[in-house]
Amino acid sequence: MRLSQMGGKEIVNLNTGERLGMVAEADLVIDKSTGNILRLLIPEGRSQFALFGERNFIEVPWENVKKIGNDMIIIEQEERKKRKGFLILG
């Protein structure tokens, strides 16, 4: 599956039924040497000022992705691993 095909899919937690957001809104952490996806960083809440400051993220290890369907990605995660700050690339 191409990354462009995943953008419109909704991310849902199987354990809680919670809708976490869309893949298009999430950041992917990718291993530079292998090209494998390591984790998803899903923005928590939607702030119009998110571009100008720190954002809160829900961190989802790629191993927690259980199913990629036509309309959604189902993850299985007991607790929210929160991460705060700027996303640093490099």
Image (cartoon, grey):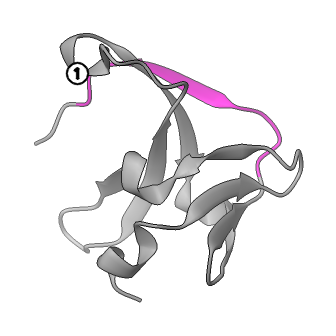
| Numbered range of the magenta stretch | 77-87
* Quadrant assignment for the N terminus: bottom left
Asked if 57 appears above or below 27 in the picture, the reply is above
Give the percent coordinates (x, y) of residue 13: 77, 52
The x, y position of residue 3, in whole percent, is 33, 76
The quarter of the picture where the C terminus appears is: top left
Question: Number of callouts in the render?
Answer: 1
Q: Looking at the image, is 71 positioned above or below residue 28?
A: below
The residue that appears at 79% across and 44% down in the rendered structure is 18
Question: Is 83 in front, or is 11?
Answer: 11
Q: Is residue 68 above or below residue 86?
A: below
Q: Mark 1 sits on what residue? A: 51
Residue located at (31% from left, 76% from top): 4
* Residue at the limit of the structure toward the front, as seen here: 48
Left or right side of 2 for 78? right
Furthest residue to the left? 90
Q: Secondary structure at mark 1?
A: helix
Question: Magenta stretch containing residue 83, yes or no?
Answer: yes
Q: Is residue 81 above or below residue 50?
A: below
Magenta stretch: residue 2 in it?
A: no
> In terms of depth relative to the viewer, which is nearer, 35 or 71?
71
Q: Quadrant of residue 12?
A: bottom right
Packing grade of label 1 (10 A; few <14, some 14-19, many >=20) is few
On the image, the x and y values in percent for residue 55 come to 38, 19
Q: Tell me which corner region of the image, top left, top right, bottom left or bottom right, holds residue 63.
A: bottom right
Identified at 49% across, 41% down, the residue is 42
Where does residue 66 sit, x and y in percent of width and height?
71, 72
Which residue type does callout 1 highlight? Leu
Q: Is residue 76 left or right of residue 20?
A: right
x 83%, y 41%: residue: 78
